[in-house]
Image: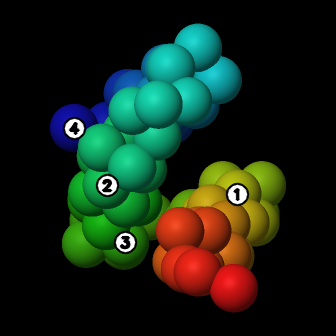
Amino acid sequence: MAFEQLKSGIALLLEEIEKRPEDRHILQEELREKISELRAMGLPVPEDILRLEKELEDDDSDDMYDNMPV
């Protein structure tokens, strides 16, 4: 798959994450797979995508404590 196709697939995933926040975890895994494909092909991962990946991971660590009793 070409770099542009992967970038376009990532862009679609980002739109889906915005539209369907309840499915964010599933879509986030798909995003990680696309990023892995880029890396496996030796292609650069755009900086904005790397920042987003980090933000999503940070959000996940915050969610871990959302349902804990106080």
Q: Position of residue 2 (x, y in %)?
A: 32, 37
Which residue is label 2 attached to?
29
The residue depicted at 67 percent of the width and 75 percent of the height is 62
Q: Position of residue 9 (x, y in %)?
A: 40, 27
The answer to whether the residues at label 1 and label 2 have Cβ atoms under 8 Å apart is no
Q: Position of residue 28 (x, y in %)?
A: 42, 50
Which residue is label 1 attached to?
52
Closer to us: mark 1 or mark 3? 1
Of the two numbered discs 1 and 4 on the same chain, state the one appearing first in sequence: 4
Residue extending furthest toward the bottom? 70
Q: Nearer the viewer, residue 27 or 5?
A: 27
Of the two numbered discs 1 and 2 on the same chain, state the one appearing first in sequence: 2
Give the quadrant of residue 50. bottom right
Structural crowding at the residue carrying mark 1, measured as other residues with C-alpha within 10 Å and reported as few (<14), some (14–19) or many (≥20): few
Q: Relative to 61, is 3 above or below?
A: above
The residue depicted at 47 percent of the width and 31 percent of the height is 22
Give, as a three-letter code, the residue at label 2: Glu
Give the secondary structure at mark 1: helix
Which residue is label 3 attached to?
39
Query: Is residue 17 left or right of 50 when viewed as pictured?
Result: left
Give, as a three-letter code, the residue at label 4: Met
Q: Position of residue 26 (x, y in %)?
A: 30, 43
Structural crowding at the residue carrying mark 3, measured as other residues with C-alpha within 10 Å and reported as few (<14), some (14–19) or many (≥20): few
